[in-house]
Amino acid sequence: MASPVVSLICTVGSLFCKSFIFERNTTPTMFNKEEAFNKISELVERFDDQKEFYKKSDYNETLTRKDYIDPFFEALGWDMNNKLGAWEAYREVIHEDRLKIAGQTKAPDYSFRLLGGQRLFFVEAKKPSIVVCRYCK
């Protein structure tokens, strides 16, 4: 039986695949739903197999982003590294975007956008040793 985290990631992955991959056709790496699910499942399995190592403080946020977060969103059809060569206003993903919130400048790790720069959602990455939820184990 899959752990709750594995189930959640696979469910989220499946939802994103349904919402984005088939409706967005501009990305350089297009996966069908099954391929995306398999790629995400491989990421989950790899993490689960080595989670004790990943939870050590030596495994940092940059490695987490490169090894897991970027491939996760690439599997969902997002152009994580601007392989299309889009101009700034047309990039799907901005790394370290700048936002003004309550008069302060913030920089989320990822800003996912629609064409023309409309922000859709943000992702803030943390290394696996950081507890981001007081109810999570």
Image (cartoon, grey):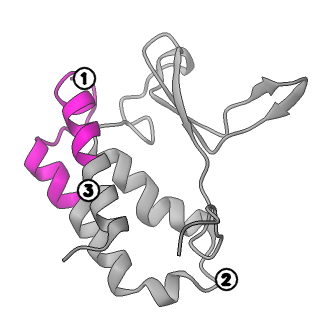
Can you give x and y, in whole percent of width and height, for residue 102 in the image? 87, 24
Q: Which image quarter holds the N terminus?
A: bottom left
Residue 106 picture quarter: top right
Q: Which residue is mark 2?
A: 57
Marker disc for residue 10 = 3
Q: Looking at the picture, does residue 113 appear above or below residue 17?
A: above
Q: CA distance from mark 2 to mark 1?
A: 37 Å
Q: Secondary structure at mark 2?
A: loop
Foreground: 31 or 82? 31
- Report the amino acid beneath label 2: Ser
Foreground: 44 or 69? 44
Q: Is residue 111 magenta?
A: no
- Report the amino acid beneath label 3: Cys
Name the residue at 59% across, 55% down: 125
Q: Label 1 neighbourhood size at 10 Å, few (<14), some (14-19), many (20+)? A: few
Residue 110 picture quarter: top right
**Closer to the camera: disc 1 or disc 3?**
3
For marks 2 and 1, the one nearer the N-term is: 1
Q: Which residue is mark 1?
A: 24
Q: CA distance from mark 3 to mark 2?
A: 26 Å
Can you give x and y, in whole percent of width and height, for residue 6 in the image? 31, 66
Q: Looking at the picture, does residue 120 appear above or below residue 28?
A: above
Q: CA distance from mark 1 to mark 3?
A: 20 Å
**Which residue in the rendered view is the most extreme toward the front?**
135
Question: Is label 1 in contact with label 3 (beta carbons under 8 Å)?
Answer: no
Q: Is residue 77 left or right of residue 90?
A: left
Q: Label 3 neighbourhood size at 10 Å, few (<14), some (14-19), many (20+)? A: some
- Report the amino acid beneath label 1: Arg
Extent of the magenta region:
13-39
The count of marks equals: 3
